[in-house]
Amino acid sequence: MKEMSLQSSNMRPAPPSKMKPLFTIVIVCLMVLGSGLQIQFSFAELTSGLPNMRDLLVQLVPPNWAYFAEITSSIMETIRMAVVGTTFGGAIAFPLSMLAARNVFHKSWVTVPARFVLNLIRTLPELLLAALFVAIFGIGPIPGVFALMLFSLGVISKLFYESVESIDPGPMETMTAVGANKIKWLMFGVVPQVMSAFMSFFLYAFEINIRAAAVLGLVGAGGIGLYYEQTLGFFEYGKVSSIIIYTLIVVLFIEYLSTRIREKLT
Amino acid sequence: MIEFKNVSKVYPNGTRGLKNVDLRIDDGEFVVVVGLSGAGKSTFLRSINRLHEVTEGEILINDQSITAASGSDLYRIRRDIGMIFQNFNLVRRSSVMRNVLSGRVGYHSTLRMILGLFPKQDKAIAMQSLERVNLAEKTYMRADELSGGQQQRVSIARALAQEAKFILADEPVASLDPMTTKQVMDDLVYINKELNMTMVVNLHFIDVARKYATRIIGLREGEIVFDGPVEDATDEVFSNIYGKPIDEDEVLGAVK
């Protein structure tokens, strides 16, 4: 308090205007309200749907435990699709992210096209990609793998090139000074700095891909999603809940593993 | 031998980095470059191995122009010039050994380096370099597990493993305390005397410069305002270089 009185009052700056945050709030409210009205959103709809939801839940219990054995091979297929898709996606994401990183390639004729390609891949949702590939390659896990490959390429490279851009420039400078050419410069100045981040993003993409692979079957792209659609179509809710529980177990297990490994990587 | 032939550097924003620098550094010299921050010390040093491009003039390294060289010629000239940085510039996550070995990439084919295959002999050279700076027992530790002074000595070992003829050191002790400063500077003197590597070192502190240099170059606003043996660098000379009377900002104190 004493220090306050020492300061002469005419030196105190005026507080910033309160209009700006107020304006922001009004805009956001208008947007939410407008969007809700346009799509005729109402909470009444939700409450009227509640009994249906309860019926479904009742039918889901008990799960058809015998069905577990039957879908195991399909669950395994889902995991294999994620493994193959993520690996190839990651293998392409690594060099492409390097090309997109402005601190690694200083020429904009390298980084701009690389970024354009990455942005293009990212805009397509994986289900859409899968549907597209099913049309090209036919039903089965192959289009699913391609969809996951492109999807993980997008996920990994987006995260990865940003982390490449934030590395310590020191070792890169050193490698220039040592007389390394561009490839040696990359191998010793950049790669050792980004490898653990890459592995971490790779595992993260694998986690997402397991979940994504579980629904790809809905469009005929292989994996457990196929069974999901079939059983739901025949109202076999016991089987549906088996699939849900099985998927949940696998996803949780893989997420747990991957999180543990990623902790070790830092 | 390093030769500057009427070298000037103007940054794109118009700032003058170097102005008509014309000098020769002979083999075996221990040159210390002094000046205020922003006087062009770093630009001077980095133009020697062309980390910075100059806008005018020529720099010769053992009679070969580095300013005109390109591609593999440039890489080969750079291989002969080791560099030590203020912030050590080690790959923090890599082992000490791998950091030292990275000094040797200029001696091997690109394919071999992609695979990371260093010959046995290189590992022996790296080990020997680490022994020279008394860090052999840290060989397989991660670089970031070491103290600042130790990290700087690893980067000295890297320059040794490079088997360079010249060593450039850009403020090598600026982020170290007085005790480790002495250790690092002693290492540089040892390398200069025993291995006959030419040293060009940027320093801020006058007493450190006086203790270790055989020759002092003073820079002010990109211009050489003093160049002579350390005995001639009197207090008046230093205050002329710094453009103000010498005070405690320019003296480290603990180096005796």
Image: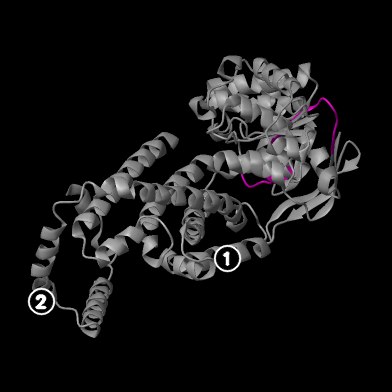
Q: Distance between the residues labelled 2 and 1?
A: 44 Å
* Span highlighted in magenta in the image: B24-44
Which residue corresponds to mark 1? A117
Please tell me which residue lies in front, B118 or B84.
B118
Which quadrant of the structure image shows residue B55? bottom right
Asked if labels 1 and 2 touch by Cβ distance under 8 angstroms, the answer is: no
- Pointers 2 and 1 within a single chain: yes
**Depth-wise, is mark 2 or mark 1 nearer the camera?**
2
Disc 1: which chain? A
Disc 2: which chain? A
Display coloring = one colour
**What's under tag 2, amino acid-wise?**
Ala
Q: Which residue is drawn at 30% across and 45% down?
A: A69
Which residue corresponds to mark 2? A44
**What's under tag 1, amino acid-wise?**
Val
Q: Residue at x 65, y 23 (%)?
A: B185
Q: Is residue B53 left or right of residue B156?
A: right
